[in-house]
Image (tube, rainbow, N blue to C red):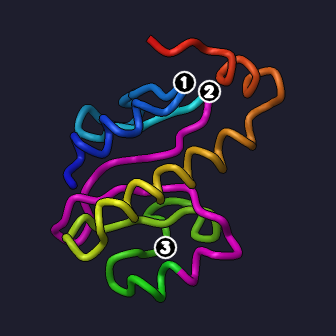
Amino acid sequence: MNHSQLIEYGLSLKGARLQYPFHPDTPVLYVGSKMFALFGSNFGYPSMTLKTNPEEAWIVREQYAGTVLPGYHMNKRHWNTVLLNGKITDRVLLEMIDESYGLVLRKLTVREREAVLNLKRC
């Protein structure tokens, strides 16, 4: 999958929105006031950086060694950078986005989370 397809999927999640807080070439997906996916390139590949469960981050890094790396310019315990080099199936990439979205959604304030969950889809 490429950035456009992954962003399109991310935007299908309730309350997700796209912003460019860092650079016009660096799209970031947010839910509420927090980001859950950052798109860029690393080591010559398109990449995405996603929130991850800190207790499981190392497992995914070992399972996809050389493709899933500690989050580039992020807290290495809580974020992974995934190189879009074709070594991870589309299904797994989408599951990683879902996990990141869910982790971030759960960390929103109660008020902010309820506002997101009460949004109506168009």
Q: Amino acid at mark 1?
A: Gly
Mark 3: few, some, or many residues within 10 Å (few <14, many ≥20)? some
Q: How many marks?
A: 3
Q: Is residue 101 left or right of residue 94?
A: right
Quadrant into which the C terminus falls = top left
Describe residue 67's horizontal placement relative to residue 78 as left or right.
left
Q: Is residue 37 magenta?
A: yes
Residue 108 against residue 41 in the figure, above or below: above
Residue farthest to the left, as pictured? 44
In the image, what residue type sits under mark 2? Gly
In this rendering, which labeled residue sits more in front, label 3 or label 1? 1
Q: Are marks 2 and 1 in contact (CB under 8 Å)?
A: yes
Q: Residue at x 30, y 45 (%)?
A: 6
Q: Residue beneath label 2, please?
A: 32
| Mark 2 or 1: the one toward you | 1
Marking on residue 15: 1
Name the spot of residue 112 as percent of width and height, x first: 74, 23
- Residue at left offset 45%, top offset 25%: 17
User: Of label 2 and label 1, which has the lower sequence position?
Assistant: 1
Location of the N terminus (image quadrant): bottom left
Side of 67 relative to 118 (left or right): left
Residue 28: which quarter of the image? top left
Residue 7: x percent and y percent?
32, 39
- Tag 1 secondary structure: loop
Q: Which mark is residue 70?
A: 3
Which image quadrant is residue 117 in?
A: top right
**Extreme residue toward the right, this view:** 110
Q: Secondary structure under badge 2?
A: loop
Could you tell me how far apart the alpha carbons at marks 2 and 3 are, in whole angstroms? 24 Å
Say whether disc 2 or disc 3 marks the residue closer to the N-terminus.
2
First to last magenta residue range = 33-59
